[in-house]
Image: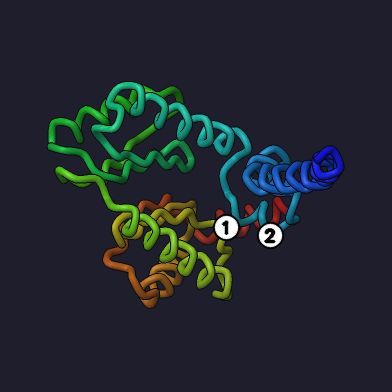
Amino acid sequence: MSNLFHGWRSMGRPVASLASLLIGASLFVSLSGCVELLVGGAVVGGAMTVSDRRTLGAQTEDTAIAIKGENRISSLFGDRVHVNVTSFNRKVLLTGEVVDAAMKAKVGQEIEQVQNVESVVNELQISPFSSSFTSRSNDVLVSGKIKAKLVDTPDIYANTFKVVVESGNVYMMGRVTKREADIAIAVTRDVSGVQKIVKVFEYIDESELTKLKEKKD
């Protein structure tokens, strides 16, 4: 019995080391967005810096807005609502489900009070039930397919676009030109599972895009 215990104890060290490695890898993946945020896109070079056209300050504030917004809604409403808070360049998109119009308005008002929020696009759906696990899993799949399509599409930067999928409805955010938006919308329409596309873009003109590219070069 003592030999058996000793064997398990010896095995514990490599198992623990493997677990630590996996946890570290997981943390790196989950924090990779934060790393890119901190270095302003330097992780992947010029393409990232051109594609994410927000200032470093706006990127930082967007992260804080999303965290503060979701925490605020969770503390006020608990599991009575299912609300996703997405911020891009201080414009907040609300998706998910609430029980009635009054609750929808109330959630929107609460998010407007979050520091640095400039505007709110309230796309919450009124429903007595929150979306199912199957529906949310399908949304993740559709989102992944859209992002893969955008990566493979010439003349646009995939990272320019923030894609949110809720019950098959696709919400697209980003600082883009009309040309870039049209290309991305056309590509997204061809993805299976897409029910509707809602544009939440902040448009820039081609001359501003040229200046951004020159600035990053």
The circle drawn on residue 133 is none
Graded by Cα atoms within 10 Å as few (under 14), some (14 to 19) or many (20 or more), the crowding at tag 1 reads some
Q: Is the Cβ of the residue at disc 2 closer than 8 Å to that at disc 1?
A: yes
Q: Which residue corresponds to the image point at 57% horizontal and 57% vertical from the top-left? A: 159
- What secondary structure is marked by label 1? helix
Q: Give 19 or 156, whichever is nearer the viewer.
A: 19
Left or right side of 56 for 182 = left
The percent position of residue 48, horizontal first and vertical second, equals 66, 55
Q: Which numbered disc, 2 or 1, marks the residue that appears first in the sequence?
A: 2
Graded by Cα atoms within 10 Å as few (under 14), some (14 to 19) or many (20 or more), the crowding at tag 2 reads some
The percent position of residue 190, horizontal first and vertical second, equals 38, 77
The circle drawn on residue 159 is 1
Q: Amino acid at mark 2?
A: Ala
> Above or below — where is 139 with respect to 9?
below
Q: Give 157 or 72, whichever is nearer the viewer.
A: 72
Q: Which residue corresponds to the image point at 54% horizontal and 74% vertical from the top-left? A: 153
Q: Give 58 or 75, whichever is nearer the viewer.
A: 75
CA–CA distance between discs 2 and 1? 9 Å
For disc 2, the marked residue is: 47
Left or right side of 147 for 173 = left
